[in-house]
Protein backbone atom coordinates (compact mmCIF):
# COMPACT_ATOMS: atom_id res chain seq x y z
CA UNK A 1 0.00 0.00 0.00
CA UNK A 2 1.12 3.44 0.94
CA UNK A 3 4.14 4.62 2.46
CA UNK A 4 7.72 5.08 3.14
CA UNK A 5 7.24 7.66 5.82
CA UNK A 6 10.16 9.42 7.41
CA UNK A 7 10.29 10.00 11.14
CA UNK A 8 9.00 13.56 10.63
CA UNK A 9 6.00 12.41 8.60
CA UNK A 10 2.98 11.07 10.42
CA UNK A 11 0.53 8.78 8.66
CA UNK A 12 -2.88 10.41 8.30
CA UNK A 13 -4.94 7.79 6.47
CA UNK A 14 -4.95 4.23 7.74
CA UNK A 15 -6.37 1.27 5.89
CA UNK A 16 -9.28 1.26 8.35
CA UNK A 17 -10.04 4.97 7.91
CA UNK A 18 -9.87 4.62 4.11
CA UNK A 19 -12.41 1.78 4.24
CA UNK A 20 -14.61 3.84 6.58
CA UNK A 21 -14.69 6.82 4.20
CA UNK A 22 -16.18 4.56 1.52
CA UNK A 23 -18.78 2.94 3.78
CA UNK A 24 -22.05 3.84 5.42
CA UNK A 25 -20.10 4.34 8.67
CA UNK A 26 -19.07 7.75 7.33
CA UNK A 27 -22.35 8.67 5.63
CA UNK A 28 -22.14 12.23 6.98
CA UNK A 29 -18.54 12.65 5.79
CA UNK A 30 -17.03 13.48 9.20
CA UNK A 31 -14.03 11.19 8.72
CA UNK A 32 -13.56 12.22 5.10
CA UNK A 33 -13.44 15.96 5.85
CA UNK A 34 -11.40 15.58 9.04
CA UNK A 35 -8.68 13.60 7.24
CA UNK A 36 -8.78 15.90 4.19
CA UNK A 37 -8.24 18.88 6.51
CA UNK A 38 -5.30 17.16 8.20
CA UNK A 39 -3.67 16.29 4.89
CA UNK A 40 -4.36 19.75 3.45
CA UNK A 41 -2.67 21.37 6.45
CA UNK A 42 0.46 19.29 5.83
CA UNK A 43 0.62 20.47 2.21
CA UNK A 44 1.17 24.16 2.83
CA UNK A 45 4.49 24.16 0.93
CA UNK A 46 3.28 22.22 -2.12
CA UNK A 47 2.94 24.21 -5.33
CA UNK A 48 -0.64 24.22 -6.61
CA UNK A 49 0.55 23.34 -10.12
CA UNK A 50 1.93 20.03 -8.82
CA UNK A 51 -1.41 19.05 -7.33
CA UNK A 52 -3.44 20.45 -10.24
CA UNK A 53 -1.83 18.00 -12.67
CA UNK A 54 -2.86 15.07 -10.48
CA UNK A 55 -6.30 16.58 -9.90
CA UNK A 56 -6.86 17.08 -13.64
CA UNK A 57 -5.98 13.45 -14.30
CA UNK A 58 -8.34 12.28 -11.58
CA UNK A 59 -11.18 14.51 -12.82
CA UNK A 60 -10.79 13.06 -16.32
CA UNK A 61 -11.18 9.56 -14.81
CA UNK A 62 -14.20 10.68 -12.79
CA UNK A 63 -15.89 12.35 -15.77
CA UNK A 64 -15.34 9.37 -18.08
CA UNK A 65 -16.75 7.06 -15.42
CA UNK A 66 -19.87 9.18 -14.86
CA UNK A 67 -20.47 9.48 -18.63
CA UNK A 68 -20.29 5.71 -19.08
CA UNK A 69 -22.72 5.23 -16.18
CA UNK A 70 -25.16 7.66 -17.81
CA UNK A 71 -24.91 5.56 -20.97
CA UNK A 72 -25.85 2.44 -18.97
CA UNK A 73 -22.42 0.85 -19.33
CA UNK A 74 -21.76 0.17 -15.65
CA UNK A 75 -19.64 -2.97 -16.05
CA UNK A 76 -17.45 -1.34 -18.69
CA UNK A 77 -17.28 1.86 -16.63
CA UNK A 78 -16.16 0.04 -13.47
CA UNK A 79 -13.46 -1.97 -15.24
CA UNK A 80 -12.12 1.08 -17.08
CA UNK A 81 -12.22 3.20 -13.92
CA UNK A 82 -10.29 0.59 -11.93
CA UNK A 83 -7.68 0.43 -14.69
CA UNK A 84 -7.35 4.22 -14.84
CA UNK A 85 -7.14 4.50 -11.04
CA UNK A 86 -4.32 1.94 -11.04
CA UNK A 87 -2.58 3.98 -13.72
CA UNK A 88 -3.04 7.11 -11.59
CA UNK A 89 -1.37 5.25 -8.71
CA UNK A 90 1.63 4.60 -10.98
CA UNK A 91 1.73 8.31 -11.82
CA UNK A 92 1.65 9.14 -8.10
CA UNK A 93 4.67 6.89 -7.56
CA UNK A 94 6.47 8.74 -10.35
CA UNK A 95 5.54 12.17 -8.94
CA UNK A 96 6.65 11.07 -5.49
CA UNK A 97 10.01 9.75 -6.71
CA UNK A 98 10.71 12.95 -8.66
CA UNK A 99 9.88 15.21 -5.72
CA UNK A 100 10.66 13.22 -2.57
CA UNK A 101 13.86 15.11 -1.76
CA UNK A 102 12.35 18.51 -2.57
CA UNK A 103 8.84 18.11 -1.17
CA UNK A 104 8.13 15.67 1.64
CA UNK A 105 4.59 17.07 1.73
CA UNK A 106 3.92 16.14 -1.90
CA UNK A 107 5.41 12.69 -1.29
CA UNK A 108 3.09 12.24 1.67
CA UNK A 109 0.08 13.34 -0.38
CA UNK A 110 0.98 10.72 -3.01
CA UNK A 111 1.21 8.01 -0.32
CA UNK A 112 -2.02 9.02 1.39
CA UNK A 113 -4.04 9.38 -1.82
CA UNK A 114 -2.73 6.00 -3.01
CA UNK A 115 -4.25 4.38 0.09
CA UNK A 116 -7.60 5.93 -0.76
CA UNK A 117 -7.37 4.78 -4.38
CA UNK A 118 -6.67 1.23 -3.17
CA UNK A 119 -9.71 1.33 -0.88
CA UNK A 120 -11.89 2.78 -3.67
CA UNK A 121 -10.85 0.02 -6.06
CA UNK A 122 -11.60 -2.65 -3.45
CA UNK A 123 -14.96 -1.08 -2.55
CA UNK A 124 -15.88 -0.65 -6.22
CA UNK A 125 -16.16 2.78 -7.84
CA UNK A 126 -19.90 2.42 -8.52
CA UNK A 127 -20.81 1.21 -5.04
CA UNK A 128 -23.16 3.60 -3.23
CA UNK A 129 -22.04 4.79 0.21
CA UNK A 130 -25.65 4.51 1.34
CA UNK A 131 -28.65 3.43 -0.70
CA UNK A 132 -29.39 6.18 -3.22
CA UNK A 133 -26.38 8.22 -2.07
CA UNK A 134 -22.95 9.16 -3.40
CA UNK A 135 -20.85 6.55 -5.11
CA UNK A 136 -17.37 5.58 -3.94
CA UNK A 137 -15.80 7.48 -6.87
CA UNK A 138 -17.71 10.61 -5.80
CA UNK A 139 -16.34 10.31 -2.27
CA UNK A 140 -12.82 10.03 -3.65
CA UNK A 141 -13.45 13.25 -5.61
CA UNK A 142 -14.84 14.94 -2.48
CA UNK A 143 -11.71 14.01 -0.54
CA UNK A 144 -9.42 15.38 -3.23
CA UNK A 145 -11.38 18.64 -3.48
CA UNK A 146 -11.53 19.11 0.31
CA UNK A 147 -7.76 18.58 0.53
CA UNK A 148 -7.16 21.10 -2.26
CA UNK A 149 -9.44 23.63 -0.59
CA UNK A 150 -7.51 23.30 2.65
CA UNK A 151 -4.16 23.87 0.90
CA UNK A 152 -5.51 27.07 -0.66
CA UNK A 153 -6.34 28.47 2.78
CA UNK A 154 -2.63 28.80 3.56
Image (cartoon, rainbow, N blue to C red):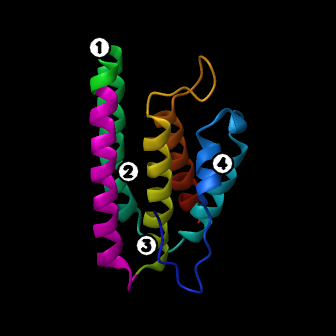
Identify the residue at image location x=32%, y=12%: 72
Q: Is the magenta stretch mostly helix, strand or loop?
A: helix
Q: Which mark is residue 33?
A: 4
Which numbered mark, 3 or 2, is in the foreground of this view? 3
Determine the CA span between mark 3 and mark 4. Answer: 20 Å
Tell which of 54 and 129 is nearer to you. 129
**From the image, which quarter does the C terminus lie in?**
bottom right
| Sequence-first tag of 1 and 4 | 4
Residue occupied by mark 1:
71
At x 49%, y 34%, the residue is: 138
Give the residue pinned by disc 3.
107
Return the x and y of residue 7 as percentages of the image width and height.
59, 87
Q: In the image, is residue 78 part of the stretch drawn in magenta?
A: yes
Crowd class of label 3 (few under 14; some 14 to 19; many from 20; radius 10 Å) = many
Toward which corner of the image does residue 71 lie, by quadrant?
top left
Which residues fall within the magenta stretch? 77-102
Reply yes or no: does residue 151 show up in magenta: no
Distance, label 2 to label 4, CA atoms, is: 17 Å
N-term-proximal mark, 3 vs 4? 4
Residue at the spot of label 2 = 55
Amino acid sequence: MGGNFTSSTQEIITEASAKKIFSGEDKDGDTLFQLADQLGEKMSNVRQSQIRKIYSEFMRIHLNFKNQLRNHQEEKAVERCKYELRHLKARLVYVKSRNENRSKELAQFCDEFTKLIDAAIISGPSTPIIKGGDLVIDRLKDFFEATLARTKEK
